[in-house]
Image (spheres, grey):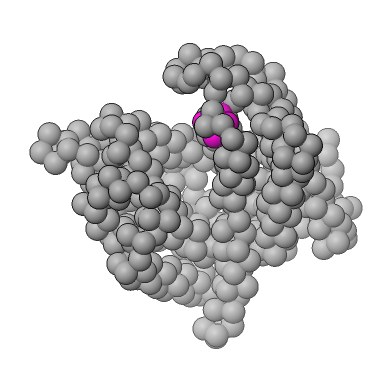
């Protein structure tokens, strides 16, 4: 297969994923923006707190997208469509069971959370109003994780893009309608998000009917959900669940440690992390392409195409890293000023802006390997790598904190990315390439 054809395949998968990724932060931004127009600072605080609660609930369910994508891609590569449909049934079934569990514990979860979260009574009350409405979208939200992973595994990144854009546009329109036009306030924002999630799920089901109607004959719900049939699915996703816990430890640890250094440094660290996420949305698009194509060629036992794909994916991702570094070099402070007009925060940020130049080149290798390893369903290797990297994150911070202060936090964050990159590079032949030769 020529490089031109392979590049075309990569871009066909990566392009829609990048567009979809860019819309993802719009949900939180829309909710915050509408809250900010309700004329009350407590409304903004309530949305921020409630959104954090949903992040805690849903972050660790990310395996529903990741694991589903890897297994489905390999089934696609084998042209084993009965197995592909079995994986979708298992993923959606797991999503629904998880949603019911979340519904069952919602009250205990919120009450426990506010024993830790120090919020004013008004913020707490409004956050609970939002939470107890939006929580009923759990089945739709988690099922959409499963559908997104399945579509990507089927080498289809257009359908998840359409679904994501539908959810985000409807969230904007409906939240404005309920919160502002009907005067419902915070509950209206939650209701808009709730309805948008279910309409997004309806969109995913419609796309399934349009593109995969012929595969419906392979759906066997009772047989697919037997525990014996789900063993591999649970083993892989158990490993990916641990990976998600590790991510949560790094990012929540980053925020909580930064908070110890005062409001200014917390604000700087928070904005810096958001600016770095801008770059990651582009790399993740190619990581998704790597996931889909790696799974496909592992399933097809096509070593030559697998190696060629990995090489090209890395060229694209490293290229994005270089371009992002140049963009941050010339636009780092202007981008920062878009996020805040607080001169004290901007002044403080200048000593940290060089990290924006370093992080894209450090992180692009780790992010790319993540997608490739997921496509190869090398979940144990991903789990073990993340555990080691978390240890390095905290070890480096505490090792350097006394000498460089909060800069040690960034040293630790960079170290965990380097560790992930090095380990996965060293074990890629065993964990990825060898799977296409079995």
Closer to the camera in the image, 50 or 401: 50
Closer to the camera in the image, 19 or 159: 19
Quadrant position of residue 194: top right
Closer to the camera in the image, 211 or 218: 211
Residue 287 x, y percent position in the rendering? 51, 61
- Residue at the limit of the structure toward the front, as seen here: 39
- Identified at 65% across, 58% down, the residue is 153
Residue 141 x, y percent position in the rendering? 69, 40
Above or below, 255 against 429 in this view is above
- Identified at 30% across, 38% down, the residue is 264
- The reply to whether the magenta stretch includes residue 345 is no
Residue 416 x, y percent position in the rendering? 31, 46
Q: Is residue 298 left or right of residue 344?
A: right
Magenta-highlighted residues = 43-47
- Identified at 38% across, 72% down, the residue is 323
Q: Is residue 196 visible?
A: no
Above or below, 152 against 393 in this view is below
Tell me the chief SS of the magenta region: helix
Q: Is residue 338 left or right of residue 347?
A: right
Residue 18 x, y percent position in the rendering? 57, 63
- Identified at 56% across, 20% down, the residue is 122
Q: Is residue 131 visible?
A: yes
């Amino acid at each position: 297969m020529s490089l031109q054809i392979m590049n075309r395949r990569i871009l066909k998968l990566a392009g829609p994923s990048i567009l979809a990724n860019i819309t993802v932060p719009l949900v939180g931004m829309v909710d915050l923006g509408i809250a900010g127009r309700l004329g009350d600072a407590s409304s903004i605080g309530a949305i921020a707190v409630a959104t954090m609660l949903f992040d805690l609930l849903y972050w660790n369910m990310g395996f529903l997208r990741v694991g589903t994508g890897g297994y489905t891609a390999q089934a696609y590569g084998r042209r084993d469509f009965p197995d592909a449909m079995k994986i979708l049934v298992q993923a959606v079934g797991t999503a629904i069971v998880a949603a019911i569990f979340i519904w069952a514990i919602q009250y205990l979860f919120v009450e426990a959370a506010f024993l830790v979260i120090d919020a004013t009574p008004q913020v707490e009350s409004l956050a609970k109003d939002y939470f107890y409405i939006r929580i009923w979208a759990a089945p739709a939200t988690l099922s959409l994780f499963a559908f997104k992973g399945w579509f990507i595994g089927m080498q289809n990144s257009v359908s998840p893009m359409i679904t994501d854009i539908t959810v985000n546009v409807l969230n904007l329109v409906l939240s404005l309608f309920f919160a502002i036009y009907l005067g419902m306030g915070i509950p209206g924002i939650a209701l808009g998000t709730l309805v948008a999630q279910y309409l997004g799920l309806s969109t995913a089901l419609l796309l399934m009917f349009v593109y995969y109607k012929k595969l419906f004959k392979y759906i066997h719900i009772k047989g697919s959900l037997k525990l014996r049939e789900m063993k591999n699915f649970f083993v892989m996703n158990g490993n990916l669940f641990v990976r998600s816990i590790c991510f949560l430890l790094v990012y929540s640890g980053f925020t909580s440690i930064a908070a110890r250094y005062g409001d200014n440094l917390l604000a700087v660290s928070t904005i810096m992390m958001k600016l770095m996420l801008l770059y990651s949305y582009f790399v993740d698009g190619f990581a998704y392409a790597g996931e889909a194509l790696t799974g496909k060629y592992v399933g097809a036992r096509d070593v030559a195409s697998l190696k060629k794909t990995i090489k090209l994916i890395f060229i694209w991702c490293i290229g994005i890293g270089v371009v992002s570094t140049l963009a941050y070099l010339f636009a780092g402070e202007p981008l920062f000023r878009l996020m805040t007009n607080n001169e004290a925060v901007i002044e403080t940020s200048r000593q940290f802006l060089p990290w924006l130049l370093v992080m894209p080149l450090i992180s692009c290798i780790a992010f790319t390997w993540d997608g490739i390893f997921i496509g190869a369903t090398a979940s144990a290797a991903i789990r073990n790598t993340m555990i080691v990297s978390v240890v390095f994150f905290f070890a480096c911070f505490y090792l350097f904190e006394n000498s460089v202060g909060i800069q040690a936090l960034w040293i630790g964050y960079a170290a965990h990315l380097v560790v992930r990159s090095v380990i996965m590079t060293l074990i890629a032949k065993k964990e990825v390439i060898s799977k296409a030769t079995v």
